[in-house]
Image (tube, helix red, strand yellow):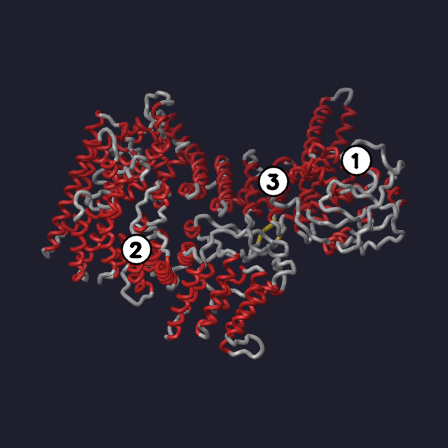
Amino acid sequence: QRRSSRNQSAAPSYKEPVVEEEDSSSEEEAESPQRSSKRKSPSQPEVRKAAQVATPKAKKSPPNPSTTPKAKKTPAKSGAQGSEDSLLELISTKPNAIPMAAMQFWEDESSNRELAVGRVIRTILQASGCNEKLSNEIFSEDRDIDDDVRAIEQSTTHVKSILSGKDHRSKKLRPNMSEFWRKIIIQASDDNILEFSEHPLLRWLFALSTSQLKDIRFGASFAVIEMMLALLTKANEVLDSINKLDRLVNAGGAAKNRNKEQLQSRMSMKAAMEGLMDQFFNSLFVHRLRDVDADIRTRSIDCIGQCVANYKTKFLDNTFLKYLGWALYDKDYSVRGASVNALKSLYETNQVTELEMFTNRFRERLVEMRLDINEDVANATLQLLTTMSKANLLSKEDNEAVYRMLIEDSSAIRDSAAAFINAAYLEGVLTPIYEEAVAGGARTNKDETLLKGLIEMVTMIIGSEIVDSTVSVMVQALLPFMPMLQDWSLVHKILEEDGDDPEILAPEDKAMLAKFLVAALQASRESSSSDAKAKGKTKKSDIKGDFSKGSIFLSTVLSSLLKKFSADQQTLKGLVQIPVFLDLDSLTQSQKQPMQDAVNTLVDISSKEQDTELLTLCAESLAVINLHDYPLKPTLSAIVDNYIDSVRSDMAKILEMISKNTKLTSTHLLKLKKCSVMASSLDIFSHDNDMPEQICQVLKKLTANADNSQTATVIQHLVSMVSLSVLWRSKFLIESKDSDASTSVIKSNIKSRDLSFKKLVELASADLPAAIRLQICLAIGDVMKIYGDRNEAAAERKIGIQLPSRVFLEALKVIESAIEPILSQEGEIPALEDLKETVSDLSLPFDQEDRNGVHKIAALALVTPVVYHPFTGEEGNQAMTDAMCTALLHTPYGSEFQGELSEVVGRVLTDWKVKLSCFQKMYNKILSKAQAKEDVEELTTALIDAVSSITLDTEVVEAFIWDGYEWSIQGMPQSLGFLDVLSLQIKFLPSVRTKSLLSKMDELCASEGLSLSGKVDPRLEGAVKFRNKMIDHLKSFGSDGAKNSKSPAAKKVATSDRSEILETPSKTAKLSRGIDDDDARSDQVMSTPSQSTPRNVKEAKSSGRKPASQGKQQKRKIEDEQDEEGFVATKRAR
């Protein structure tokens, strides 16, 4: 009856256009009573063009009572062609009416299928940004839907999609639209479900899901995905009823035959639903899983994950699981994350047997994804691996690889790694060992077993990668699972153990435990507050977690620990840091004698030791004891003051010996080294402000004999002491968290320190060996870090401690003159070995094989003053540009360093005129070297990288290019080559400013009597080339001024990169460890996912995997062959 009714009502393919007011979404569209008697061919659908002449709205015709059910109060009108605007508005604004709207669809479908399908499809198109108006006739069953969809794509005026957008309106619409599609399935009758596989609505959705327009494809895919999820719910209800009826049939009884019939009916419904699921999967998911739009791929993977989790009887099979595995290689992080989250829910349900084949196939990839560039994906992967470890699905090598994540930079990653260690090692390995020992009659402590086992594991697996700064964050992550780390008595007991018992920790393990002890004490201090220490604590017999009690306990045992490990430098390096984190305010007279012994032991270690690191740590602890106010300070500070006096006395004797030309013995050199190290934390000049001046005088005398290796060593130590005499107290008080730190102490030293700083600058310009001059320049930079106007720490504390800007300006000039010969390789280049101790203070690894190591240090010395102090005025700008030009214009240091250096310079030079001046100086230097027949290829590369790295505001780009162009024309022909470098900024010009610039350029050339058209002077080739690039850039814009990336001009501009400037492309872009999600994707369907990039580049290198470089990921082809296991074999070729 429905079909005969539809066949009797012949209608044209499309209705006449209707006038609509803008944003009149609440108005309903009336159906025109007049219809054309001619029917358009299915292959030539008529789509309303935006340019057609509109006609007034026709009056609404009354519904036909023979085909329309009795009127009901529904949210959308039935009968004639309804308004897709009204349905979309209802879904958007009235979520409570969505069930009624879904029910209305089925009511309309029973009387006029074209009407019902048309209203829903129009709603999808409108929500997807398609503004075409389609008549009901196009939705008849005898149409070629694929042709109709192609015609819609070609004639549509595409606007912004509402459904796939990122704004608030889109986020509000998506859950409502999801509810609508789910209700369509939920409210469908059994007959509707049985016939749904042939329904035109599905045919339209599948056809739209292959549209060339991304937003239409998204809208259709979104609908099918939500219907699939609703079908899962309905199928589970059918399964429940089947199980119930099966039990009733087996139980027998009078209703057995009736229950059998119902069971058969439910089984038929189950088969129909599963057939519908297969249709959904084969018609949509198989294709959309390789869609170029990452959002569609993400939603498809998420849906498959829910299918497997919620309908295991069908989907928990390798045929479907393989798609989750392939998604782990996708180049978009959201797709990888969706796959990992889906797998988490599966492994948490203990479906180990069903997942065994999948685990064997993709376990290696999952372990690799702990290094994903996206932190959320990496974190989710670690949580998945934790679940897998509980089921013993990971190998020993897999576990050890995850253990190393405990030293990652991200706190979330460290926390997840700690949870993994707790599950895989503490509970999975150590707890069974403890339980077995107890069962065997051994008397042991569980906390002790776990703590020893953890320390041994950390030392063996990641000990070589740990530095002091990482121990603290490791302990922070482990404390929730290992509270015994703050059981001070237990840690002390383990450290004090001696003998041949295999249960006793080895020396290297005790050294690691000492570091953990200090980190746990630091964590306890940071988590404690004055109120928490006074109240709110439950009284316990032990001292776990209590900072004050812990400080009291450790203060009593510190001296014995220091003496016990006095010959073990590695363990001692941890123990000597304990005073830095003690709660000195909690110490009373009871702890006076133990603390005196501890401080005396520290002083004794400082007097005897020669290791620079250990001496520095001792000095820091003594400084804390000497500077802060606490009850025992008078007693303890006196010990430290006596030691400072002895250091100052040794220093005075050494200066006197040098003044008298007395040769220094090895003992004197060792004392001089100790004086230099101690001066980094202790103010050995506080009572003798004349000593820096005496040191400067001695240095002047030593410069004549600087070639002597011993003299060079002496000079290095003395230079360090001069700089430290300026730095030590200011730096300590600014960085100190002690709110009582007196700023007056800093300010009172400015006047006397100013004199020392000037002496330091004088030394930098003296005739000294290059290594010493470089060290002096680094020392000057350290001073400017503290006293510069850009010192953020000082600004937060509101401490005005700046030295005169004139002094800094002179220092910058001196540094530039000292560094320039090193970077230009025209002067003496110091050996890296001579700078070993200097390098250890920088964030650079000491690598004797790094041929650019010295140049990197020199560049840092030159850039540091500009980073921490703004130089203004004409003279300041001149000095800045000279310094930055010298730093950048060097044989490339290496890709990562060069890129970061260029970015820092671009960020520091805030004025675009200063940046342009810097680039022009670089060009002139290159030009002069080229004229001298020198190889300038690498220098040109450095200039290109510098210009490429800067980011300018839109209004600034025009002025930047204009000034550079004017400079080039006026200095022609030599300066015309600069236009090639300047062209790198053309792509940032908007169309209006491009036109303006072209006009100004033509006027300038006319005023100079130059012609850039017709027969052109060969010397003007660079100017002609630049002008043509500007014209190509202008052509790449559309009539509305928007960029048209598909136009030939745009493609020409895109391919005109810096390789045209230099024959070999630049190798010095900043290293990118991530996947650029904004990269332009291919219009073709993605064949296979791309592999993500490791978070930890060092670990990636050690594992033999090559980190992904910046730019587009190379596509990999995939060939599918059904293998014996039911998987699709994957053959990847780069």
Above or below: residue 208 compared with residue 419: below
Above or below: residue 175 compared with residue 1062: above
Q: Label 2 belongs to which residue? A: 806
In the rendered structure, find residue 270 and report the number of the disc placed on it. Answer: none
- In-front residue for pair 669/1015: 1015
Q: Quadrant of residue 564?
A: top left
Query: Sequence-wise, which precedes: disc 3 or disc 1?
Result: 1
Mark 2 element type: helix
Q: Nearer the viewer, mark 3 or mark 2?
A: 2
Q: Circle 2: is it few (<14), some (14-19), or many (20+) Cα within 10 Å?
A: few
Mark 3 element type: helix
Look at label 2 and name its amino acid: Arg
Mark 1 element type: helix
Residue drawn at x 71%, y 27% is: 246
Check if mark 3's residue and mark 2's residue have beta carbons within 8 Å.
no
Judged left or right of residue 220, residue 168 is left
Image quarter (top left, top right, bottom left or bottom right) of the C terminus:
bottom right
Q: Is residue 444 visible?
A: no
Look at label 3 and name its amino acid: Gly
Q: How many marks?
A: 3
Q: Label 3 belongs to which residue? A: 305
Query: Sequence-wise, which precedes: disc 3 or disc 2?
Result: 3
Residues under labels 3 and 1: Cα distance?
29 Å
Percent of width and height locating residue 332: 56, 49
Residues under labels 3 and 2: Cα distance?
66 Å
Q: Label 1 belongs to which residue? A: 191
